[in-house]
């Protein structure tokens, strides 16, 4: 499972002109489930997202987690994070999980973050979504449960 974690002052996802999910201070997490990913991959990414120390402490150092900072998460499924562009111009998505497994593991990820005490809003799986992110910093972190980067 892969995730792009962007620290934000606010984030909104709309579908068909209607707000599907919205957060203030926290993260917008773009998440992609890969072929062969398991519940353990989703739990790994959820723990990383929840425990990342990228919020500033009283000394201005990135030393607080989202739990410490009292933020929330806007989680958006984005299978294109598994796009492969090596040697080609058009991405291949053969490494992305099939939709049914992608949805199941995305939901495992969301529930794992919620169980850790973070409020989570989501987009709409499989829908065409418009995402607005007020990236704070900017701070953007990449996570991969297979540790390929």
Image: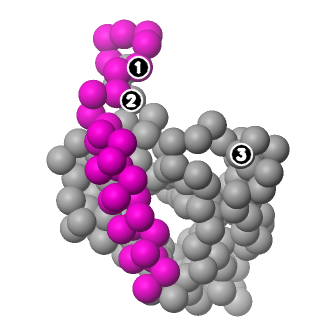
Q: Earlier in the sequence, mark 3 or mark 2?
A: 3
Disc 1 on helix, strand or loop?
Answer: loop
In front here: 59 or 140?
Answer: 140
Disc 3 on helix, strand or loop?
Answer: strand
Give the answer, above or below, for where 140 lies relative to 50: above
Give the answer, above or below, for where 86 lies relative to 149: above
In the displayed orientation, state which residue is furthest to the top: 88
Residue 122 visible at all: yes
Residue 133 visible at all: no
| Numbered badge on residue 15 | 3
Q: Earlier in the sequence, mark 3 or mark 1?
A: 3
In front here: 43 or 25?
Answer: 43
Res. 138 image quadrant? bottom right
Q: CA distance from mark 1 to mark 2?
A: 5 Å
Q: Residue at x 74, y 49 (%)?
A: 14
Q: CA distance from mark 3 to mark 2?
A: 23 Å
Give the image location of residue 140, x and y in percent. Answer: 57, 54
Disc 2 on helix, strand or loop?
Answer: loop
Q: Earlier in the sequence, mark 1 or mark 2?
A: 2
Give the image location of residue 100, x and y in percent. Answer: 33, 47
Q: Residue at x 66, y 42 (%)?
A: 129
Horizontal side of residue 134 vs 103, given as left or right: right
Find out whether the residues at labels 3 and 2 contact each other: C-beta distance under 8 Å. Answer: no
Find out whether the residues at labels 1 and 2 contact each other: C-beta distance under 8 Å. Answer: yes
According to the picture, the residue beneath numbered tag 2 turns out to be 83
Q: CA distance from mark 3 to mark 1?
A: 24 Å
Q: Residue at x 27, y 28 (%)?
A: 94
Q: Is residue 99 covered in magenta? A: yes
In front here: 139 or 100?
Answer: 100
Which contiguous range is marked in magenta? 86-115
According to the picture, the residue beneath numbered tag 1 turns out to be 91
| Numbered badge on residue 36 | none
């Amino acid at each position: 499972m892969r995730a792009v974690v962007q620290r934000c002052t606010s984030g909104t996802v709309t579908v068909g002109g209607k707000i599907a999910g919205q957060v203030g201070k926290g993260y917008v997490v773009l998440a992609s489930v890969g072929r062969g990913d398991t519940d353990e991959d989703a739990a790994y990414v959820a723990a990383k997202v929840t425990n990342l120390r990228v919020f500033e402490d009283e000394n201005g150092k990135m030393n607080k987690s989202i739990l410490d900072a009292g933020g929330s998460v806007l989680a958006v499924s984005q299978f294109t994070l598994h796009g492969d562009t090596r040697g080609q111009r058009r991405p291949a998505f053969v490494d992305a999980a099939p939709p049914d497994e992608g949805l199941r593991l995305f939901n495992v990820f969301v529930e794992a973050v919620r169980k850790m005490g973070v409020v989570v809003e989501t987009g709409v799986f499989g829908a065409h979504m418009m995402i607005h992110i007020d990236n704070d910093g900017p701070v953007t972190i990449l996570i991969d449960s297979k540790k390929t980067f």
